[in-house]
Amino acid sequence: MPRPTKCRKLHYTPDFYYFKPAGIPGRNLEEVILTLDEFEAIRLADFENLYQEDAAKQLNVSRQTFGNIIDSAHKKIADTIINGKILKIEGGNIDSLKERNFICYQCKNEWSVPFGVERPSNCPNCNNENIHRSEKDKGFGQNK
Ligand SMILES: [Zn+2]
């Protein structure tokens, strides 16, 4: 039986990561770095039209943090298109988002699964289905 496809919006790597005004040599232009969390904030709020509260949950940060991230992203994009700068998407505070950590309540096995891979349905060690996201994933976005 096929499992329902879980929405996995957290994992999204940009297909395009370098934007430059046409016809001007890059060396004459200033670069603006849009971080991946800013990119994801733009995608969730401005492209997917999520409410900030829901978008914040997707990004695993508080609503206030989300507000700060998207403000910063908007300012960078405005600066880029108004002043004709290069926009580069890279980096950012997303280390904890690269993989999800799971723990088995049966054998206490802990393992990680990259984003973009389907959520495991059972423990790779003992095959038990009583698995949960590890505690260490839950702190992401707090106190940073
Ligand atoms: Zn197990």
Image (cartoon, grey):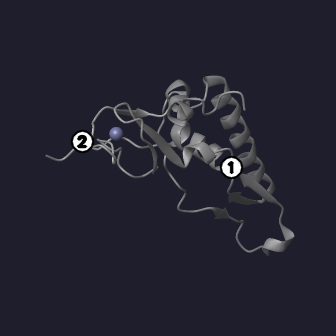
Give the residue at the far front of this rendering.
107
Viewer-proximal residue, 101 or 41? 101
Work out whether 70 lies above or below 2.
above
Assess disc 1: are there few (<14), some (14-19) or many (≥20) residues with their C-alpha within 10 Å of its C-alpha: some
The residue at the point 67 percent across, 28 percent down is: 65
The residue at the point 71 percent across, 66 percent down is: 20
Q: Which mark is drawn over residue 4?
A: 2
Q: For the residue labelled by badge 2, is the local secondary structure a helix, a strand or a loop?
A: loop
Q: Which mark is drawn over residue 142?
A: none
Q: CA distance from mark 2 to mark 1?
A: 31 Å
- Locate the C terminus and report the quarter of the image it occupies: top right
Q: Which residue is mark 1?
A: 35
The residue at the point 40 percent across, 32 percent down is: 132
Residue 85 coordinates in the image, percent (x, y): 78, 59
Work out whether 107 lies above or below 23.
above
33 horizontally vs 128: left or right? right
